[in-house]
Amino acid sequence: MGDLLDGYTPERAWDEMFVGPDQPRSHYQSLHQVLGTLSRDDFELRCAARDRAFHDQGITFSHSGEERPFPLDLVPRIIDAAEWAVVESGVRQRVLALERFLADVYGPGEILADGVVPRRLVASSSHYHRCVAGLDPAGGVRVHVAGVDLVRDGAGSFRVLEDNLRTPSGISYVVENRRAMTHVFPELFASHRIRRVADYPVRLLEAFRATAPPGVDDPCVVVLTPGVHNAAYFEHSFLARQMGVELVEGRDLVCRDQRVYMRTTAGEQRVDVVYRRVDDDFLDPVHFRPDSVLGCAGILNAARAGNVTIANAPGNGVADDKAVYALVPGIVRYYLGEDPILPNVETYLCAIESDRRYVLEHLESLVVKTVDASGGYGMLIGPASTREEREDFRRRIESVPRAFIAQPVVALSIQPVLDGGRLRPAHQDLRPFVLTGPSVHVTPGGLTRVALKPGSLVVNSSQGGGSRDTWVMAENTGEDGGA
Amino acid sequence: MLSRAATSLTLFGRHLERADHLARILGVHVALSLDRTDEPGPEFWMRFMQLAGWAGSDTGRRDQAVEMVIAGTLGPSVRASIAAARLAAQAVRPSLPSELYEQVNALHWRVQEAKWQPDLYPLLNSVQMGVRMVDGLLEDTMSHDEARDFVRLGKFVERAANVTAIVTRKSAELAGSPEDALEWTAVLKSCFAFELYQARYSGGVVPDRVIECLMLDEALPRSARFSAEAALTAVMNIDGKGKRSRPRSLLTKFRALFARASIEMIAQQPGDFYAECRGLLRQLELALRETYFHPSKVPTGVAGDQERAMPQQ
């Protein structure tokens, strides 16, 4: 009998694995049995094998300019088929509604005219770009790839924490985490029927090909990266390699006659779909930051002329603005006539005076977020903040109220992580990835991000977060299981 | 193929070859300095540093030379060459088989984290075997297409330049001193050619035969002539049938230089021969840029400088 699980005590939050001390949830029983046979030394040995593999394979991310292996905790998260069905429908519904919202905002603006979303809120978003108005993307798809961040509250219900509709990252770690787990824990895969994630790149390419400009039989797809120094470069090269397409930088592209070409050794070659992993601000110096050399001058005009598909479409950030997030339940009802399947976290908009007053009076107990920030930056976690930090945020909120929202602290669910040879609870979230092409597809599972610092609620890799493999169990209907 | 990818693949081949070359000449010269009755004077190490590409270096001690050629940052070093090869590989990662990239990456970390005191040889051996492994993966797992040809182009141009430099320099330096044979043996070992030389020639190591072997042999993969031929073949493959690019013309001239040369000519006027080679290789560098690498004229540092302004979602 192993000692790995000895001394693990769940905290006062929803524990993904345990109902009570040494009482695993039903869908974790098999995993619990296997882990129960392991000693700490066994587990450490497997961790070392994982570290060596990630190190040599270059599965890394850039942290403050330093290259680090992406941290993977070896205890997987398990979601049963019935619960996943709800999550899948919920994120699909949300992405469908936000797709309609973007088409409306950059088109007729009916939702604004009907007052469901204040026009001022949209127009004042730093991610709303007038130059995108009237752009009619091929197949009507703007959100080819979405990452919807979910958390489980204290009662165990999934809630949406934020939407990522610009350049959501993390899918490469989902696929590589799975590959690493099959090497490190083959016996677990023999005893579980797990839905596969390895086909993501194939589906991604399918989505791009389906949304290429009309009349192109064999579209040329490229991945546009800011370059090898970008924090997510591993992911960019991973996706290009897995899809079998070129990984280009801005300097490889040129626009001529409203068409995009890449510079090759055999001359210029036409490009039909650009999966850009470059922010809007850097995408096209003609329309956005004129000093950018990371994008391609004229690409937006080429997209407007229908000669190239940009995935995701420019201007999507207006729909994942954290202030607009608060209104997404209404957006779902407006376009789909349905109640949201996945609720939001309660949110206060500092742009609204009554909300602002409440936020300023309760800074100590709320999480305040900057509406256009990502990566876990621009946040104040009230209970963990100092007086100086709160005063700083108070001044900033009073100065630009539109730039902030606040939410109550959600005690993110917990699960064991290995720390110093012992298992201890750590908070985590879940980012399922949604692809829109010929149809909408939700990758089973997604990236579970783990706050590795004890007690921390910040799961972003740029701030010391890690990840774990996420298993969605196959239903007993002969559904595909495997790595 | 993307022009930028062609640039990176060529650099990849070139830097790996340089790392291998530096590791090999360092190992051979350290052995040479130890296997003698007296400690060589500072001029021995100064000449070695020149050979390793540290022009103007006045390093006259073994430990300093080892430190600089393994890990120096102000001139060519094993560590810097492997880091540059890895960076080039990263830039074209989708064009390389995963196994190949992983070998380069693992080699990079081994060299970054390595200690070379007190025993230097495990590290040098690990570098050389690592490069051999990458060579093998290149041949066995990578499609024999344009991407591989650009790697081979970089590798063989670098090799031809290195071999020419080492042979012509030694020809100029060694003027019949009693240790000639020992030094020429070191040259052969530096070029992976000692055993082949022994098998082919009888009567000991003599300068003329070393020159013939390392500069003019058509079958020895480490000879300058073989390397020039291999580089030309790579460019002909890249160009395809019927195209006569400027790099192809220059490499044809470069090959002809070795085909026409005689042992006497190189032995008597090594400086002139070297200068002629260098002149052609400089022209080739410009021609490669204009023909295949044109977009790389954009400064490569710019993209990295701006990435911090772009958090990922």
Image: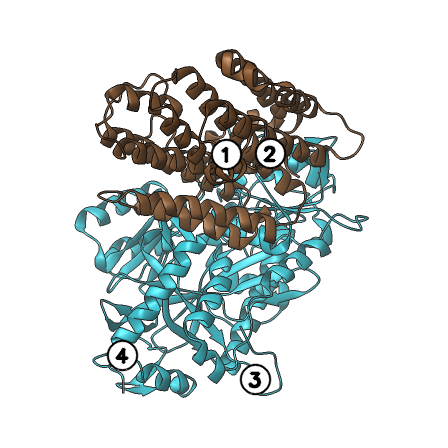
Chain colours: A cyan, B brown
Q: From the image, tell me which residue sits under label 3.
A: A475
Q: How many marks?
A: 4
Q: For residue B34, say whether it is visible.
A: yes
Residue A173 image offset from top left, x and y in percent: 46, 60
- Give the crowd class for mark 3: few <14, some 14-19, many >=20 residues within 10 Å: some
Q: From the image, tell me which residue sits under label 1.
A: B202
Quadrant of the rendered image containing residue A209: bottom right
Q: Amino acid at mark 2?
A: Leu
- Give the crowd class for mark 1: few <14, some 14-19, many >=20 residues within 10 Å: few
Whichever of labels 1 and 2 marks the residue nearer the N terminus, that label is: 2
Q: From the image, tell me which residue sits under label 4.
A: A39
Using the numbered discs, state the Cα–Cα distance from disc 2 to disc 4 in whole angstroms.
53 Å
Nearer to me, A80 or B16:
B16
Q: Are marks 1 and 2 on the same chain?
A: yes
- Tell me the tag on residue A267: none
Q: From the image, tell me which residue sits under label 2.
A: B153
Using the numbered discs, state the Cα–Cα distance from disc 4 to disc 3 in whole angstroms.
32 Å
- Name the residue rendered at 64%, 24% in the picture: B255
- Give the crowd class for mark 2: few <14, some 14-19, many >=20 residues within 10 Å: many
**Compared with residue B229, is residue A31 higher up or lower down, i.e. above or below?**
below
Q: Secondary structure at mark 1?
A: loop
Residue B300 image offset from top left, x and y in percent: 49, 30
